[in-house]
Amino acid sequence: QVQLVESGGGLVQPGGSLRLSCVASGSIFSIGAIGAMGWYRQAPEKEREFVAHITRDGRTNYADSAKGRFTISLDNTKNTVYLQMNSPKPEQTAVYFCHAIERSNLNNIIHHWGQGTKVTVSS
């Protein structure tokens, strides 16, 4: 069983920056089976949407809204994924959720989610 715990959310000005962190914990078997981690967000009265994704070997993908301002990174030694948010926009205010994809040797896929950390972008 994989558990994800986010931290780093809070209030940030549009021209400021913020870094979110997410630590994955669990059995050595489950942790070792995580192939990718990422971030999603959910604003009030909106559906959860993809923000960024990174594989264990460093391949990244970003939503269009995140390109150029957000950077995702992964520290494999700490089982921690980060989201660096530079100059976020007010419309990017949301609860940000950590996500991990666990893959078994039989190609079974399990999606894990953290409880979320709230980011408020405001002057």
Image: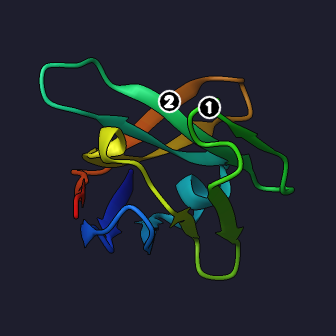
Q: What's the residue type where badge 2 is placed?
A: Phe
Residue 35 percent across, percent down from the top left: 70, 45
Q: Which residue is mark 1?
A: 63
Element marked by disc 2: strand
Kind of residue sitting beneath label 1: Ala
Q: Quadrant of residue 49?
A: top left
* 4 over 104 or under it: above or below: below
Pick the front one: 36 or 87:
87
The residue lying furthest to the left in this view is 45
**Percent position of residue 107, x then y:** 71, 23
Mark 1: secondary structure: loop
Tell me, yes or no, whether the two marked residues, 1 and 2, touch with CB atoms within 8 Å: yes
- Residue drawn 45% across the image and 55% down it: 88
Apparent side of residue 36 relative to residue 122 in the rendered image (left or right): right
Residue ranking furthest to the bottom? 77
In the depicted structure, whether residue 67 falls above or below residue 24? above
Compared across the picture, whether 91 is left or right of 85 comes to left
Of callouts 1 and 2, the N-terminal one: 2
Q: Which residue is mark 2?
A: 50
Residue nearer the viewer, 44 or 91:
91
Kindly report which numbered mark, 1 or 2, lies closer to the viewer in this rendering: 1
